[in-house]
Image (cartoon, helix red, strand yellow):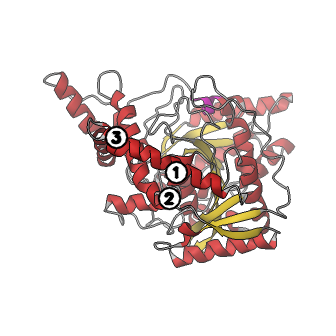
Amino acid sequence: MHDKTLTQLANALGSGELSSRELTEHYLQRIQHSGATLNSFITVTADQALAQADAADQARANGNAGWLAGLPLALKDIFCTQGVKTSCGSRMLDNFTAPYDATVVEKLKAAGTVSLGKTNMDEFAMGSSNENSYYGPVKNPWDLSAVPGGSSGGSAAAVAAGLTPAALGTDTGGSIRQPAAFCGITGLKPTYGRVSRYGMIAYASSLDQAGPMARSAEDCAHLLNVMAGHDVRDSTSVARGVPDYAETLNAPLSGLKIGLPQEYFGEGLDPDVEKAVREAVRVYESLGATVRDVSLPHTHYAIPAYYVIAPAEASSNLSRFDGVRFGHRCDNPSDLIDLYKRSRAEGFGDEVQRRILIGTHTLSEGFFDAYYTKAQKVRRLIRQDFLDAFEDVDVLMGPASPTPAFDLGAKKDPVSMYLQDIYTIAVNLSGIPGISVPAGFVGRRPVGLQILGTHFAEAQLLNVAHQFQQTTDWHLQRPDFAEESA
């Protein structure tokens, strides 16, 4: 069962070949057997999952079940889930049980999905390797000595290992696309505002976006059909109709115009990654697409701009975690100031503290205009680069990451870790959608092809990704770990 895509499992449920309880029990057994090795889950909600599975089976028996009814999923532990611990991978929220559901969780529940539990993540979504979690690092199922990517590494590893057929992630600077690339799965970052952020614990509010992670673009399309849409509870949610993303998956690619940003194929790109990406582009040419070089001239400013804007917003968002209202509280504080200081020092890990300090500095008097205002101006230039490029091409393609997954503990220098997101960060600064699809291997470590589109072009991205996956089988490859865990 764990070898099937979400779409194949939905068809099996619809035909009566499987029941949701059988499917859910199968995945729960796999999590129990091998989940600790990967450390991909923080919380497993077995009792709740089985109850939801029984409800889905009953709905199917009554003839009123939707397409997703009875399908198991996992949720990144950044989404508030009523009655379930929601930790954000942090000691600060280790004792927090959410009193309500995030909008995407609410929508998926209404669609009849089964929640297997909450997946591990970099603390407050700050990281590119999933080594920053209070609950320990997640391991890559393709190579247990490698990172799975971050911050949605727990979700990516769980899907790749066959512990769940799909999962939710969040993407602030590449945190869906980069772990999807490292773990050989498909991950979609929608247009900013396409999916509600209500109930998603904020890191950087102008950058965060929820998205689906699964084995195929087809699976992601069906999930996005449920997740997308306007939400009056989220002021950044866009009031725009939601198309049927699965309806156009099989549209032919003849005449598709692909742009290759020259800045994505320069210094720092692993030659084997480049080879895999260029071979993937040649597949598109065989499907009738044309390819041309384009330029995104302000790309090299993306990382410095991001690491001013994102920490500034994080500094503001995380100020609420003070040990008073909720979250970690230190023992025996001597006064209120001591309570604040020690609760935050004990509750936040090193990387979170680093970004809070950077953000507080850039927002302080005398530095706001010099850093934050200037970074926002650069952000506008980066966005305009993409808009100009999409005047001439339909989609952009390039690597999702400059290297395949690196070894656990290999990136001691924070800057070298930040550079792992060099091809993904500009997408969040611009608010456009992007998807990473499996496109080969370097040794036994996967390579991801990143496909970018203009605002609200998710349907086209999913179509372009799906057609590639109809021609190749990279997305069907499974790590040995998945079979050893059977």
Q: Is 478 in front, or is 133? A: 133
Disc 2 + disc 1, Cβ < 8 Å: yes
Q: Earlier in the sequence, mark 2 or mark 1?
A: 2
In the image, taking residue 381 as reference, residue 110 lies left or right, namely: right
Based on the displayed image, in which of its 4 quarters is residue 182 positioned?
A: bottom right
In the image, taking residue 398 as reference, residue 472 lies left or right, namely: right
Q: Earlier in the sequence, mark 2 or mark 3?
A: 2
Magenta region, main secondary structure: helix
> In what quadrant of the picture does the C terminus appear?
bottom right
The answer to whether residue 158 is seen in the rendering is no
> In what quadrant of the picture does the N terminus appear?
bottom right
The residue labelled by disc 3 is: 369
Q: Secondary structure at mark 1?
A: helix
Q: Is 402 in front, or is 114? A: 402
The residue labelled by disc 2 is: 298
**Which residue type carries mark 3?**
Asp
What residue span does the magenta drawing correspond to? 102-106
Location of residue 252 in the rendering, given as x and y in whole percent from the top left corner: 85, 60
Disc 1 + disc 3, Cβ < 8 Å: no
Location of residue 246 in the rendering, given as x and y in whole percent from the top left corner: 80, 47
Q: Residue at x 27, y 28 (%)?
A: 329
Q: Earlier in the sequence, mark 1 or mark 3?
A: 3
Based on the displayed image, in which of its 4 quarters is residue 289 positioned?
A: bottom right
The residue labelled by disc 1 is: 381
Q: Is 52 in front, or is 67? A: 67
**Which residue type carries mark 2?**
His
Location of residue 399 in the rendering, given as x and y in whole percent from the top left corner: 58, 66
Q: Residue at x 56, y 45 (%)?
A: 169
Up the image or down, 237 lies above or below 390; here it is above
In the image, taking residue 273 as reference, residue 280 lies left or right, namely: right
Q: Is residue 79 magenta?
A: no
Up the image or down, 265 lies above or below 31; here it is below
